[in-house]
Image: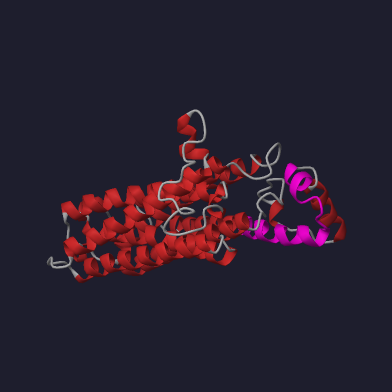
């Protein structure tokens, strides 16, 4: 692939990363404002057009009135209230559609101009498959709140969020070798293995972040560093059978989320400490410093989000922090990996 072509493909991939990032952030605001069930149908094409007149708005509102969220929680909503929550869910879905267009049209152009070799065609199709899966999981999540529940399943929320991060991660990983020459990579097997473990723990933390959000577990025990005066809350084994506490007990889910956060902070500081005097490339040093800054930023945002009872702005920033931390670990992995593991 020529340098001009590399720049075009890089721009294409990074545009996709940006849109996925925006979609996750808007998705977080959608969840925090209780807007995710405001659109009760999934119409990929015609759903891109919002209600255009009073009659269409009333029809959409009438459909919303049929689901438990309205009947049990928002029964006092007027049409103006409905329009506010509709806005966030519509914007969330609109960005999802934009991602599809941004990925598809340049791909067809590159294919037509024969800018992509067989390997890049496979990579592109893989990203398309991840994007399609993400869209399906979004509707699968929404469906869980349209019949008996007043909110979506926190299990489905976690799967949907994780799929978005995985799609973002692979897109970024494919873009990095186009942005940096292989000679800029300085492989280090031990640090690479350490970073893989760190990435795995960050992914588990993302899942528990989704559990915490979906269960509204961040709205209890809003003290730090203890949980209402206890280091280990007394109610963490309240559910039976016991394994349910790991996934459905609000206190336990928040406690695990905190413990994983401490673990990630410690691991990143160990990463920095172990490599501070090593003969690293400038990119490797920079990547580790970014990981350190990202984890400190994310940890502080988590604390403030908790003690201020999960305000929308702070909670959304906390999700942004999660994205930066996830991205920083992937970038560090790239610079410590063997050139054979990536290709341009």
Please state the horizontal and vertical placement of residue 52, each as a whole percent of the image.
80, 61
Which residue occupies the extreme right position in the image? 55
Q: Nearer the viewer, residue 175 or 321?
A: 321
Identify the residue shown where x is 76% and y is 51%: 74
Please state the horizontal and vertical placement of residue 258, each as a whole percent of the image.
41, 52
Identify the residue shown where x is 55% and y is 43%: 154
In the image, the segment drawn in magenta is: 68-94
Magenta stretch contains residue 85: yes
Q: Nearer the viewer, residue 216 or 125?
A: 216
- Total numbered labels: 0
Magenta stretch contains residue 273: no
Please state the horizontal and vertical placement of residue 336, each as a whole percent of the image.
22, 58
Which residue occupies the extreme front position in the image? 229
> Does residue 78 appear to the left or right of 336 in the view shown?
right
Which residue occupies the extreme top position in the image? 241
Q: Nearer the viewer, residue 311 or 280?
A: 311
Please state the horizontal and vertical placement of residue 184, each as a whole percent of the image.
20, 66
Q: Quadrant of the C terminus?
A: bottom left
Q: Quadrant of the N terminus?
A: bottom left
């Amino acid at each position: 692939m020529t340098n001009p072509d590399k720049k075009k493909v890089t721009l294409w991939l990074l545009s996709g990363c940006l849109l996925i990032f925006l979609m996750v952030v808007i998705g977080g605001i959608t969840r925090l404002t209780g807007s995710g069930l405001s659109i009760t149908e999934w119409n990929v094409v015609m759903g891109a057009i919002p209600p255009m007149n009073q009659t269409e708005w009333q029809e959409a509102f009438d459909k919303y009135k049929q689901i438990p969220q309205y009947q049990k929680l928002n029964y006092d909503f007027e049409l103006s209230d409905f329009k506010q929550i509709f806005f966030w869910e519509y914007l969330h879905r609109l960005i999802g559609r934009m991602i599809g267009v941004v990925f598809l049209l340049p791909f067809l152009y590159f294919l037509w101009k024969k800018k992509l070799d067989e390997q890049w065609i496979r990579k592109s199709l893989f990203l398309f498959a991840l994007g399609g899966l993400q869209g399906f999981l979004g509707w699968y999540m929404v469906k869980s709140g349209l019949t008996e529940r007043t909110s979506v399943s926190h299990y489905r929320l976690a799967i949907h969020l994780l799929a978005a991060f995985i799609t973002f991660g692979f897109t970024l990983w494919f873009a990095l070798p186009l942005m940096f020459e292989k000679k800029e990579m300085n492989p280090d097997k031990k640090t690479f293995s350490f970073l893989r473990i760190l990435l795995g723990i960050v992914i588990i933390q993302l899942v528990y972040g989704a559990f915490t959000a979906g269960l509204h577990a961040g709205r209890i025990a809003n003290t730090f560093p203890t949980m209402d005066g206890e280091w280990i809350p007394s109610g963490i084994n309240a559910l039976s059978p016991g394994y349910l506490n790991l996934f459905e007990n609000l206190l336990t889910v928040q406690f695990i989320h905190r413990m994983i956060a401490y673990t990630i902070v410690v691991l990143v500081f160990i990463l920095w400490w172990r490599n501070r005097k090593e003969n690293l490339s400038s990119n490797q040093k920079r990547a580790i410093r970014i990981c350190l800054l990202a984890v400190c930023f994310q940890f502080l945002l988590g604390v403030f989000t908790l003690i201020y009872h999960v305000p929308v702005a702070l909670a959304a920033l906390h999700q942004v922090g999660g994205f930066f931390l996830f991205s920083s670990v992937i970038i560090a992995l790239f610079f410590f990996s063997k050139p054979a593991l990536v290709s341009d």
